[in-house]
Structures are given as structure tokens and as C-alpha cells.
Image (cartoon, rainbow, N blue to C red):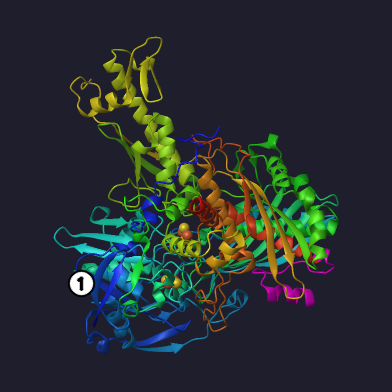
Amino acid sequence: MPRDQGIGASSARREDVRFLTGNGRYTDDFNVHGQKYVHFLRSDVAHGRIRSVNTLAAAAMPGVIAVFTGEDLEGIGGLPCGWLVTDRHGEPMNEPGHPVLAVGKVRHVGDPIAAVVADSVAEASDAAEAIEVDIEELPAVINMAAALEGGSLVHDEIGTNLCYDWGFVEDSREAVDAAIAEAEHVTSLELVNNRLVANAMEPRVALGDYNASNDESTLYTTSQNPHVIRLLMGAFVLQIPEHKLRVVAPDVGGGFGSKIFHYAEEAFCTLASRRLRVPVKWTASRSEAFVTDAHGRDHVTKIDLALSKDGKFKAIRTSTLANLGAYLSTFSTSVPTWLHGTLMAGNYTTPLVYVNVRAVFTNTVPVDAYRGAGRPEATFQLERVIDKAARELGIDPVEIRRRNFVQPDQFPYATPVALEYDTGNYPATMDKLVEIADLDGFAARAEESASRGRLRGLGVNCYIEACGIAPSNLVGQLGARAGLYESATVRVNATGSVTVMTGCHSHGQSHETTFPQVVSDMLGIDEGQINVLHGDTANAPMGMGTYGSRSIAVGGSAIVRATEKIVAKAKRIAAHLMEASADDIEFADGVFSVAGTDKSVAWGDVCLTAYVPHNYPLDKLEPGLEETAFYDPANFTFPAGAYACEVEVDTDTGAVEICSFAAADDFGNVINPMIVDGQVHGGIAQGVGQALREHAIYDSNGQLLTGSYMDYAMPRADDLPSLVVDHSCQTPCTHNPLGVKGCGEAGAIGSPPTVVNAVIDALQRGGYDVDHIDMPLSPSRVWEAING
Amino acid sequence: MATVHMVVNGREVSGEVEGRTLLSDFLRNGLKLTGTHIGCDTSQCGACVVHVNGKAIKSCTMFALEASDSTVTTIEGMANEDGSLGIVQQAFQDHHGLQCGFCTPGMVMSAAALLSENLTPGEAEIRDYLEGNICRCTGYQNIVKAIQGAAEELAA
Ligand code: FES
Ligand code: FES
């Protein structure tokens, strides 16, 4: 039965009223009295040596307060990378510096050369035009293979464009090669995972505000993880201790990964405000966002799948070039490695896997995590090669997957790529998919399409992801320079209402709604009595923020732990009030009672007693009712599912229309079904965008050809069908208290191969000998494949 | 600098603007009506949609001076007089038609404009009408549902 409160209810969103009335407070809506504005002069060449930067004329322009170049920032640190990858020979990765403003060289279009601070945006940008920059242009390295073959060097000091050559599992390399050499059948595929731009609708903003009277800085910024920014910027770049630095990430208009990272503009605005003693604000234009926000994906892969004749997977071998762009963005190095290689077993029992990744510097914008981060790349390779293998062996694509599934009785299941799946039921999600996508009705629909001269295709696909990032001791061994626990403080107020402070950050995820649902269930009080504070280092305990579908699994678990402590203490207070032993106190529906008696006290009475402790065991118990918990997960969580898509291809034009899309997901327990549906819808839209439309394209000189919404094709309302989503298959996570797995990235992970599989299926049914088309499957690419 | 007068959300306002000041700028920075959002610089995203004399307009494509003596409605003017959500706004909440909320003001203003022209739009018409509004969060599905829900509510 649907409930109207608590876990499992589709509670209406608390966030909505302020957003629907224009009362959201996004970073650009913050203005501090006396603030000045920054304009960054950015490189318009992809690679060059800076001969000179003359700022004299600019400094004399009206309204200009100061002009900074890289040399003016000497003495501050560079932007740090948060993950040290060790290569397959045991050597640390190459880790070149990343200055806040370019020093010596520019390395991508958009690299900041100088910054003007002025009274107005217009004056700052006018003055930037008056800066004289003399740059000796160098050949740009854009293509990854060429970058490794001795093109010019992005970072001269490391003597190579290779960041690392990573092998996983290195000890399996020979066994995998042997299994492939001896296999009854090997299917191979070369594919590109196209480069994308996250394009959160709110462009990035930074506002630094220094208060000289107490030597404290505040940074307002569009971030998914304000505490992480405080730590990285404070400790590594500007040397400001935490107690003198507050980072506020208020309402944030979407992130999708791109607002995890510590960016130069944040450090610059904070620093300039300290030096100039005025608040300093920067608001990105969309054009600027395209050349400064970290991009996503951009892998080129060759994959080999060894099978028996009856379609049992025997071994997988991949070789990938991963583009890191010009500098190491905060978590960039972990994405092609630990977030990618560990997922190559998929939902299957493949016994042997070897993944090789060479990560490459190029003269392009840095590449880092984008919704799914590494897991979409893994899923895409695997599910595309499985589809091709099924065709080669004449096995139905659903059937070949079923033959290889990890079975429900095999959990916990240790993969050959270091993960232990705690729970899942892949046959059940596939059964659910067959039902909701009406796969049995496909033949009739294909016939109907044919009667209109269209080729209809069906794509199916499975995915698994590792979410709930992450056990700190494990990721520490893998090179993370951070712990990945989460924090919560639950503050019960004197009259019984509750304030939850979380280290997670909501930028569309609806934490203000779902977190109270959890607490409401545990305390038996109305959701409306509970609110959530987040996004401000001044009010929440140190937390790691929101990404990797971690908020409910890790942050929600921290809230559960803190609330358990609240209940334990409240029971002791109740026991005192009822002159009973705490062990005999039962708590349900907001009432404390003594087991086996009719004695009870209400939640509100206990809360009031905690803060007005006249009748209180002060010798044994502190007054007040507020608890903090830090939760470090024991394992990742493993959401998984099966997706299907039907397309129609117009062979005259190459145009692809998505006729239907169905998703059967297993997210474990679900807190708010309405919100989970919405997360899946959004993820699928992004995945369909990747499959059919989106592409960040550089020309050979390093100019971004798709640098605005005129050229970068964002999915629009009329590109998508009505999606069918279902998450009724639920195998609860076994190691977190809510049994939840996370749902934020599934759609973006599962959908690209589904769409591509469907298009290839359509073409094959039409008699075209097309095995693969690289994304995005634009009409011209499909047409070329048909007519090639 | 020139003086511009307009009626915004039922209130007469005036302000000093430059010739190049966009209506979106004047609303956000001049009038502090920050509900109107800026999501792009190529008039593609629709986060800035407002109504000028009853018609949906991307406020980043119009100079403030061009809107002189007009009647402008922004997202801040869409609630009922008692402060409760208007029908379109309420439908967005009921159908979970927003996540991060950044595209939402523009979506609501576009949706209201559509429904003022067509009280019974089909799904395809709605999707077509939203061509100029980008949402990165919702996949549009629940926005479409919200508009259908609002249409039903308005027809009732
Ligand atoms: S800001 Fe006006 S259309 Fe994007
Ligand atoms: S709700 Fe985030 S962009 Fe639409």
C-alpha cells in the first residue's frame, strides 16, 4: 500500500515551492556589498609558449581594480589531483602541475592567462581585451594515439604525454591472453566513447568574500561537495586553515559530476578577495563553461570477448586510451581505472578479465567524472561486444545474457576484478524487462514499422554499477587521497522538531525531502517536523559530498546512525521520567513506553526534558539531544538492471527515432519512488543524448567546434519518448542499514549501449552488414554506415 | 544611461539602464528578481523566459529599453494572491516536474504561455512547444506530465 509518509512514500518535494516561485538561492543570486567582478582572459590557442603578458594598458582602464597574471600568483599551490594511480609496473603516475593562472605555457583553449578585477562585468571584460599577450603557438596534440607517438609535449617536464599505463588485473594478463588464444570463438570490437560536456543548466559561479577584521574567507560556489573544496583549496592551494575558511554551496543547478572538482576560478576569487580586500565574483557564461568545465568520457577501446560456441563467456581483454585533457582534474585519474576496470565483469560470471588503460595528456579541456564516470564506459564496451557475439553465434541477445548471469544463489559473488557483489537478481530484472517492454510484441511492431517503410530495431542491455562510494580503507589502498565516509548531525530541538545536517549536497537529488522520510520513520514524527541543512561548511560536519550515487547509501546511513544514537539517549531520558530501566523502554510511533506496563511518555516530553533538565539524571547523562555520526561503508553497493529500447531508422536520411524505452532497475529498497523515477528519467535522457546527439568535437588545432548550444546538441523534449521505468525488483543491499543502493547514475550507464544495440539491430534486420557505429549516431553517421 | 519604466508582476517600476542592458539583467540585477535564470549566451536554453505583454519571451534576447512601458510577468508573479502556488506551479510539484530547479522558472513560464494558447495540448504538441527550453535533470517526462495535469486542472 502506498503510504503518505516515511520510507516508501512519494512525499511531495520540500524544495519545490522555493524553486517554483523564483525564491531559490543559487550562487549567482548571492551578492555581497561592494563586490567587484572578475573577467578571465583565456587562451584562444590550444598550445603555446607565453612570451609576455603586458597588463599596463588594461590596468589603466576605467573601473579596473587590479590585473593578475600567473606570475602574480607565485607562492600559491597548484590545483591538486585527488587520486594517485600506480601503473602496471608499480610506478606512480606522471603528475604535472596545474597552476591557477597559466605560467610559461597555455595548454588548452580556455586556459586562463590573466584575470581582471573591476567595478562591473563590462569594465572587467573591456579591460581584458586591452591585455597584450604574446604567445608562440606550438603544435597542438589532440589525437590520443598521436600524442603517444611523439607529438609535441603538453607538459615538457614529464617528457611524455602518457600519464600512466595501467593494467588490471596485471597478474591475470597471461591467463587472459591464453584463454583468448584457445577460445572456440572470439568477438572483437573497436569503439569510441564520445567526449561529452556535462552541461548542468546553471553555469559555474564563484564569489570570494574576505573579512579582514577576523581574517576569515567565505567562498560561495557551485559545488557538489563544499567540504572537499574547503580542504583542497585551503590546504593545497591557498594555505588557509579550515577554521578561517567557509565554503557555501547554496542551491546548485545541477552538477552531474562537473561540480565535484576544485576549479581555478574558486581559488582565484578567494585569493583576489584576500589580496584586494573586496568581495570578488565570477559568473561563467555558457561559452566559458564549454571550455572550462571538466569534460567527460572520451575513451577509445579495443575489446575482445572469448566465448564457447554455446555462448558462455570465457575471458575479456580490453585496451583503452583515455583522454585526460591538458591537466589532471581532481578525480580524473580514478575514472578510467578503478571506476572502470572493476566493472568489466558486468552482471556475468566471466572468469578472466584483463583491462589495460593508457591515460593521455592532450591539448583539450581536462576530462573528469561525468554521470556514471567510468561505469558507462565499461558497460558500453561490454554490452556492445556481447551483442555482437550473440549475432555471430546466432544466439538471441536476451538468451546469451541469461546464460552468463551471476545467479541469485551465487551471492555474495567475488568477481575477477576485485569487487564483491553483495546481492542482486539479474534473471528477475530481465524477466521484469521482458514484461514492461513487451518484448514478445516486438515482431508485430516491427512489421507495422516495415509497412511504413521504416526499419525497426530492438536493443537490450544489462548494467551493473558500483555505487555508495566508498570504503575508505579500500580506496586508500587504490590511491585515493581522501576518505569517502559521510557525516550527519541530527539535532533534536527543545520542542521536538529535528534539524538534520548532512555532508551530502543536493543539486537536484531531493535530499530535503528524502532524508526527513528516513528520520520520520525512525522517530515516528511527522516529516514536516524535520528539515535538512546542507551545503555550508559552517553548519554541517565534514562530509564528502554528493556524486557516485552515494548520498542515500552513505549519507543516509550516517543519518540512520546518528538517529539511532538519538533514540538510545532519548530512551534513557524516558526511563528516568518513568522510573524504569532503559532496557525496558520501547519506542514506537513517537511514544516511549515501559514494556509490559501502560506507562508512556511522548517524544515531545522527552525532548523538552533534554533541554529543560529539571527532572533529569544529570549525574549520568548530559542534557541536550544532538548526535553526530560518521558512516564509512563496508562495501560498494551494486545497483543493476536490464534496459530495452526500440528504434525506427529512416534509411533514406539515417535519422533514428526512439519509439520506446524501458528500464527495469534493482536499487534495493527505495525511499521515495517518485524521486527515483525522476532520477532514472534524467539519466536515460543523458544516455540517449550521448548515444544520438551529444559530442564535444575538437579540430586538429584544438578548437572546440561544439562550444555552444548551437552546435552541441542537447537532448530536447521532442527527442525522447515517454519512458517506462520500474524498480520493483528489489534485492536490498546487505551491508547498509537502509538496504539501499543508489539510483542517480543508472540511467546514464545503462542507456547508451541499449540505443546503439537497437540501431545496429534495425540495420541488421534490414540486411545491412553494419556491426558498429560510433556515438553519437547522428543521421549522417547512420546514413554513411548504410551507404558505406 | 536611460530611464526605463515597466509594470513587473503588477508593480510599477523604473530604473536606469544602459542601451546594452538586457531585460534579463535588469530583472535580475536592477530589480533583484533572481528567479529569472541565465543558462546560456546564445538564446537557446529558455531558463530566462518571462512574459512581456502576455507573450513568452526569452528575456536574454531583449534589451530592457525595448520592454519600456510593457507589462512583464516573471516567475515571482505566478503564485496566487494568497501566496499559494498557481495551477501550473502546483502541477509541476504534483508531477515532480523539477529537480535542481534551474530550468524551472523558464519551463513554468513557457508552459503557462502554451496553456494560454491551447488548453488541450497533446503530448507531441507539448514536447514540440518546449523546443526552446532545455532541462538537463528530468528527461522532460514529468514536465510533460505536469503540463498535461495543469491543462486538465484549467479545463475543470
Ligand atoms: S539565458 Fe536566455 S535562452 Fe539561455
Ligand atoms: S530541473 Fe535541473 S535543469 Fe531542469
- For this orientation, the residue located farthest to the front is B156
Q: Is residue A24 above or below residue B66?
A: above
Q: Subunit of mark 1?
A: A
- Assign the N terminus of chain A to one quadrant of the image: top right
Q: Nearer the viewer, residue A620 or A662?
A: A662
Instruction: Answer whether residue A170 is magenta in the image.
Output: no
Residue appearing at x 54%, y 67% in the figure: B129
Please name the amino acid that badge 1 sits on.
Leu
Q: Is residue A592 above or below residue A456?
A: above
Q: Nearer the viewer, residue A475 or A763?
A: A763
Q: Which residue is mark 1?
A: A276
Q: Position of residue A583 (x, y in %)?
A: 38, 16
- Magenta residues span A764-788
Residue A34 at least partly seen: yes
The reply, left or right, for residue B36 in relation to residue A713 is left
Q: Position of residue A151 (x, y in %)?
A: 57, 81
Instruction: Answer whether residue A785 is magenta in the image.
Output: yes
- Assign the C terminus of chain A to one quadrant of the image: bottom right
Q: How many marks?
A: 1
Q: Position of residue A718 (x, y in %)?
A: 60, 65
